[in-house]
């Protein structure tokens, strides 16, 4: 059985705006703590579509068992980052820009697992000004 990687966006929104604080929880389960080599958590964007895939990492954290209490990387922990101004999510015909929280789990014997939670980074709608 593969280990379970849980990611929860705290605000439970699909759309975020530049400057918003993104809070997310991460948990690893269904694996013995001694089998875990490292856990990497990132907030990133990537392109999807025709041509080469591009990626950009906005936030990155790598933890090993020596970095945490009781050498156990499985318990829930919360991470946070302030989202950048760009690139904004885009869903074109030829290319898409997607944002996600991605968690990679490295285990003994060189195996690797990952899970991701998608969200959109969109421009803040303009404020309507009254003309009196």
Image (tube, grey):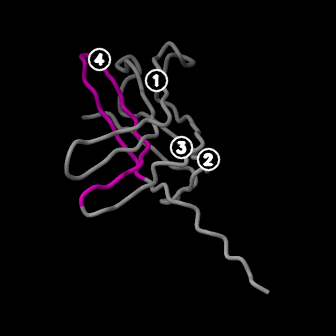
Q: Position of residue 57 (x, y in %)?
A: 43, 35
Look at 25% across and 18% down and name the residue there. Answer: 110
In magenta segment, residue 115:
yes
Q: Position of residue 108 (x, y in %)?
A: 29, 17
Q: Which residue is mark 2?
A: 21
Q: Secondary structure at mark 3?
A: strand
Which badge, 3 or 4, comes first in the chain's sequence? 3
Q: Which residues are magenta?
A: 94-118
Q: How many callouts does the rendering have?
A: 4
Front position among marks 4 and 1: 1
Front position among marks 4 and 2: 2
Q: Which label belongs to residue 24? A: 3
Look at 71% across and 77% down and name the residue there. Answer: 129
Which badge, 3 or 1, comes first in the chain's sequence? 3
Q: Secondary structure at mark 2?
A: strand
Q: Is residue 101 above or below residue 129?
A: above
Question: How far separated are the C-alphas under marks 3 and 1?
Answer: 15 Å
Q: Secondary structure at mark 4?
A: helix
């Amino acid at each position: 059985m593969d280990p379970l990687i849980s990611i929860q966006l705290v605000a439970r929104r699909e759309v975020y705006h530049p400057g918003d604080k993104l809070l997310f929880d991460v948990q690893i389960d269904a694996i013995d703590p001694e089998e875990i080599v490292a856990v990497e958590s990132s907030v990133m964007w990537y392109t999807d579509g025709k041509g080469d895939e591009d990626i950009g990492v906005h936030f990155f954290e790598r933890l090993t068992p020596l970095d945490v209490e009781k050498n156990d990387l499985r318990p829930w922990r919360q991470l946070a980052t302030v989202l950048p101004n760009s690139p904004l999510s885009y869903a074109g015909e030829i290319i898409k820009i997607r944002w996600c929280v991605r968690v990679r789990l490295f285990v003994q014997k060189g195996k690797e697992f990952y899970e991701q939670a998608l969200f959109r980074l969109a421009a803040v709608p303009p404020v309507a000004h009254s003309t009196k």
